[in-house]
C-alpha cells in the first residue's frame, strides 16, 4: 500500500506519496528530505526561476531509474500552479514555494529555465557562456578556462557572474537586463566563442560535433536561444552526490569542485555567504562596442 501524507505550505495542501523513497540513494536523500531541502533553498531558487518557462527532468524511481523531460504542465497539476504559453505548450512558472514543493513531490529533480522571462520572450535577461568539458578533461581545465574568460571580461569592464553547472561544467553569466534581442545577443556570444577558441586553441573549441572536439572545452554559445533552457541557480542535479548548480565568486573558483555544493550543505553555505548571484537580474550593461566591433569585422 502506497504511503501518503498531507503537507500544508503557505496555505496550500500538498499530498506526498512514498515519502521515504530514496531519490539520491548514495546521499541518503529521500523524498521527505528533498522536500525539506527545497523549502530551505526556495528563497534562493525562486528569484532566478520566477517568470521563466520551466522544463523539469523527473526521476520517479530516483536518479538511477528512468527519467523524462516535462515541459507541458500536466492536467493533474493543482489549479494554483501558474503557467504561460509558448509554442502551443503550457509551461509551468516556478514562482512560489507551494509550486516548488509540489514539483518535488513529483520527483522533479532538475529545474531548467529559459534565458528570458515569459513576458519578454524576445530579449534574454543575460548572456551565458556554457563551458562543457570533453571526456577525459578535469575540472582544473574548466577552472583555467573560466579564469581566462573572467580576466578578459574584466579588461573590457564587463561584469560577469559564475556558477557551477552542478555536473562537470561552468557557466558564465553576463547581465544585460533585456537590453538586446536574441539575434544581437547571439552575435555577441558567437564573437566571444570565436575569440577564445582562436586565442586559446588548445583549451577551447566551438566544434558542435562531440567526436571532433578532442580534449578541449566546448564553449557553447548556441544554447542561449528562444525556448532553450539551462539549469536554474541553486537547483539540484541528478548526480550521486546530489550536487546543485551553485553560483560562486570568481576568487573562489580555483579552490572549488562541483561536488562541493550539495542539497545537504547548500542551505548552510548560503546562510554563511549569501546569494552570490545578487545583482544579476537588475544589472544592465552596454555591449554596443562589441556589436560595433563585429560590424567592423563583417565589413573587412
Image (spheres, rainbow, N blue to C red):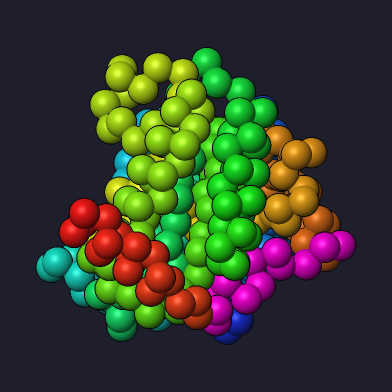
- The residue at the point 48 percent across, 24 percent down is 202
Question: Is 280 covered by the magenta stretch?
Answer: yes
Q: In this view, does 267 lie to the left or right of 226?
A: right
Identify whether 62 is placed above or below 2: above
Q: Horizontal and vertical percent for residue 168?
A: 55, 33
Q: Horizontal and vertical percent for residue 134?
A: 46, 24
The image quadrant where one finds the C terminus is bottom left
Q: Nearer the viewer, residue 104 or 181?
A: 181
Instruction: Quadrant for residue 295, please give it.
Output: bottom left
What segment carries the magenta color? 272-283
- The residue at the point 52 percent across, 59 percent down is 173
Identify whether 81 is placed above or below 205: below
Question: Is 183 covered by the magenta stretch?
Answer: no
Q: Is residue 169 left or right of residue 27?
A: left
- The residue at the point 60 percent across, 81 percent down is 10
Q: Nearer the viewer, residue 266 or 207?
A: 207
Dominant secondary structure of the magenta stretch?
loop
Q: Horizontal and vertical percent for residue 224?
A: 34, 56
Residue 286 seen by the camera = yes
Q: How many marks?
A: 0
- The residue at the point 63 percent across, 51 percent down is 151
Residue 76 seen by the camera = no
Q: Which of 285 and 105 is in front in this view?
A: 285
Instruction: Quadrant for residue 93, please give it.
Output: bottom left
Q: Is residue 97 left or right of residue 231?
A: right
Amino acid at each position: 500500500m502506497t504511503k501518503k501524507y498531507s503537507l500544508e505550505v503557505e496555505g496550500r495542501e500538498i499530498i506526498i506519496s512514498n515519502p521515504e523513497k530514496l531519490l539520491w540513494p548514495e546521499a541518503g536523500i529521500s523524498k521527505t528530505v528533498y522536500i525539506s531541502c527545497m523549502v530551505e533553498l526556495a528563497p534562493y531558487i525562486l528569484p532566478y526561476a520566477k517568470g521563466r518557462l520551466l522544463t523539469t527532468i523527473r526521476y520517479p524511481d530516483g536518479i538511477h531509474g528512468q527519467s523524462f523531460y516535462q515541459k507541458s504542465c500536466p492536467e493533474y497539476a493543482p489549479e494554483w500552479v501558474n503557467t504561460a504559453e509558448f509554442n502551443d505548450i503550457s509551461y509551468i512558472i516556478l514562482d512560489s514555494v507551494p509550486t516548488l514543493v509540489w514539483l518535488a513531490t513529483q520527483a522533479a529533480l532538475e529545474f531548467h529555465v529559459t534565458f528570458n522571462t515569459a513576458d519578454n520572450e524576445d530579449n534574454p535577461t543575460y548572456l551565458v557562456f556554457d563551458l562543457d568539458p570533453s571526456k577525459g578533461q578535469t575540472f582544473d581545465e574548466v577552472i583555467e578556462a573560466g579564469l581566462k574568460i573572467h580576466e578578459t571580461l574584466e579588461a573590457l569592464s564587463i561584469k560577469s557572474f559564475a556558477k557551477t553547472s552542478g555536473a562537470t561544467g561552468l557557466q558564465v553569466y553576463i547581465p544585460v537586463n533585456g537590453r538586446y534581442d536574441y539575434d544581437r545577443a547571439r552575435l555577441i556570444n558567437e564573437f566571444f566563442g570565436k575569440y577564445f577558441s582562436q586565442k586559446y586553441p588548445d583549451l577551447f573549441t566551438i566544434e558542435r560535433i562531440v567526436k571532433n572536439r578532442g580534449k578541449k572545452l566546448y564553449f557553447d554559445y548556441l544554447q542561449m536561444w528562444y525556448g532553450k533552457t539551462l539549469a536554474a541557480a541553486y537547483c539540484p542535479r541528478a548526480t550521486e552526490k546530489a550536487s546543485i548548480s551553485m553560483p560562486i565568486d570568481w576568487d573562489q573558483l580555483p579552490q572549488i569542485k562541483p561536488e562541493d555544493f550539495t542539497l545537504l550543505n547548500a542551505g548552510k553555505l548560503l546562510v554563511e555567504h549569501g546569494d552570490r548571484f545578487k545583482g544579476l537580474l537588475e544589472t544592465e550593461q552596454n555591449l554596443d562596442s562589441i556589436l560595433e566591433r563585429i560590424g567592423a569585422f563583417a565589413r573587412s
